[in-house]
Image: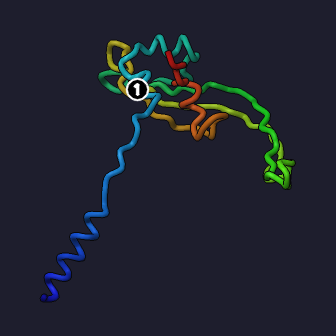
């Protein structure tokens, strides 16, 4: 076989391993895009700023202020006893900031989170606060 054949086979094998990993839809956008901005602001409070953008308005919103106490974490010791401390107890101040773009009829076209921190139950407090998981029915 020639060098070109080996190169082509190697390239084919390398490309076969490449795949696109689908990302889950943004839960905040899934929940609020298409809804009335009035409904959003009634639920979470008024925006702190607004800027007209021709066909609609871009609002800056901050909220969800909450203080939680995160307990210390410990390694598992012998016989199920508590082991060495991994992380100390701490107070965490939760908050969220988003930019909400509306159309001329006050319908939300997009929401972009611009200030977020780790939540109580996951990596995004904004997702926990603005689009809480619905209980199974």
Task: Name, please, the residue furthest toward the bottom.
Answer: 2
Find residue 137 and report its horizontal and vertical position in percent. Answer: 49, 15
Q: Which residue is mark 1?
A: 30
Q: Eyeballing the image, is 2 above or below 11?
A: below
Total count of labels:
1
Task: Name, please, the residue furthest toward the front.
Answer: 79
Label 1 Cα crowd, 10 Å radius (few <14 / some 14-19 / many 20+): few
Which residue is more in the foreground, 8 or 65?
8
Find residue 6 and report its horizontal and vertical position in percent. Answer: 19, 82
Q: Residue at x 51, y 24 (%)?
A: 131
Tell me if 57 is positioned left or right of 119 in this view: left
Find residue 112 and report its horizontal and vertical position in percent. Answer: 45, 34
Tell me if 95 is positioned left or right of 15 in this view: right
Which residue is more in the foreground, 103 or 82?
82
Q: Residue at x 35, y 27 (%)?
A: 53
Q: Residue at x 36, y 16 (%)?
A: 107
Secondary structure of the residue carrying tag 1 is helix
Q: Residue at x 64, y 31 (%)?
A: 95
Q: Eyeballing the image, is 129 above or below 16?
A: above
Find residue 83 and report its horizontal and vertical position in percent. Answer: 85, 53
Which residue is more in the foreground, 31 or 82?
82
Which residue is more in the foreground, 108 or 16?
16
Colour style of the rendered protein structure: rainbow
Tell me if 54 is positioned left or right of 90 in this view: left
Question: Which quadrant would the N terminus be assigned to in this image?
Answer: bottom left
Q: Eyeballing the image, is 70 above or below 82?
A: above
């Amino acid at each position: 076989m020639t060098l070109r054949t080996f190169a082509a086979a190697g390239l084919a094998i390398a490309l076969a391993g490449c795949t696109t990993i689908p990302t889950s839809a943004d839960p905040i956008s899934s929940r609020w895009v298409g809804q009335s901005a009035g409904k959003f602001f009634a639920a979470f409070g008024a925006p702190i700023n607004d800027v007209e953008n021709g066909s609609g308005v871009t609002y800056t919103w901050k909220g969800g202020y909450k203080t939680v106490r995160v307990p210390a974490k410990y390694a598992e010791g012998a016989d199920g006893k508590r082991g060495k401390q991994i992380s100390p107890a701490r107070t965490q101040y939760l908050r969220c900031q988003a930019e909400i773009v509306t159309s001329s009829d006050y319908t939300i076209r997009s929401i972009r989170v611009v200030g977020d921190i780790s939540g109580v139950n996951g990596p995004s407090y904004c997702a926990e606060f603005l689009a809480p998981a619905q209980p199974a029915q």
